[in-house]
Amino acid sequence: MAAPRLLLGFLVVLACFSETCFAAISFSSLRRTLVVTASHPQRLLKAGEDKIIVTWGLNQTFPAGTDSAYKTIKVQLCYAPISQVDRAWRKTVDNLSKDKTCQFKIVKGPYTTTNQTSEWTIERDVPTATYFVRAYALDAKDNEVAYGQNTDAKKTTNLFEIQAITGRHVSLDIASVCFSAFSIVALMGFFLAEKRKGSKAQQ
Ligand SMILES: *[C@@H]1O[C@H](CO)[C@@H](O)[C@H](O)[C@H]1NC(C)=O
Ligand SMILES: *[C@@H]1O[C@H](CO)[C@@H](O)[C@H](O)[C@H]1NC(C)=O
Ligand SMILES: *[C@@H]1O[C@H](CO)[C@@H](O)[C@H](O)[C@H]1NC(C)=O
């Protein structure tokens, strides 16, 4: 009698490993119960340098106990729609196991019933794009059960831009300044030469 049960148990474990055991959680099924704010020195931030201060907590209009199943909080940096256009690798999919909106971890830790704040220095590998911040509440099984974000449902407000480290090489800037200076000198030289030629022809 024990052998078939053991086999069944084994099959269940196997099924879990082959992904079917992961509950398919859809974003649209999550309740927006968290209030998330992100503050930063300016709207255009530099990867590897600037900091974002994220604050999250339960929206107090929900009754006490709403968050009783929340065990972990996961805060992420997410692509705004404008930076997802024509980029399948950043696509928003309602099935959370396939969603590519939020790809950068800001912080993950135990959920507390009081507001929490975390300061994050934008990691050096974050690409140039427009972003927002989202927090997911996870239950004891690490499944998403609720969320909150620093923008509206359509992801149009409070967005900020991050400039990647490779888009702003100082040497490149110097080179372009030198090049423009050179072009102005060259243009002036050309202009003077033409003028001299013109006055010679008049004589
Ligand atoms: C979500 O994606 C996972 C992994 O690909 C899949 O197993 C699951 O069936 C999908 N769920 C829905 C509702 O499409
Ligand atoms: C809190 O939740 C209520 C009800 O869903 C909503 O109307 C309100 O805008 C939320 N407050 C914040 C700060 O998100
Ligand atoms: C938590 O944050 C919300 C929204 O920013 C605020 O309304 C509330 O007073 C804060 N609660 C505490 C205990 O600081």
Image: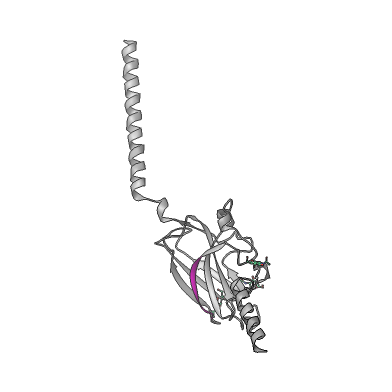
Residue located at (32% from left, 32% from top): 185
- Quadrant the N terminus occupies: bottom right
Q: Is residue 203 magenta?
A: no
- The residue at the point 53 percent across, 60 percent down is 131
The image quadrant in which ligand 2 is located: bottom right
Q: Is residue 60 visible?
A: no
Give the farthest residue toward the bottom.
1
User: Is residue 109 within the magenta segment?
Assistant: yes
The residue range painted magenta reads: 104-111
Vertical placement of residue 166 versus 191, above or below:
below
Looking at the picture, how far across and down is residue 28, in whole percent? 67, 67
Q: Is residue 41 left or right of residue 186?
A: right
**Could you say which is closer to the camera, residue 47 or residue 203?**
47
Where residue 65 sits, quadrant-wise, is bottom right
Image x and y of residue 171, in percent: 33, 48
Measured as percent of width and height from the top left, residue 146 is found at: 62, 74
Residue 17 is situated, as x and y percent measured from the top left of the image, at 58, 73
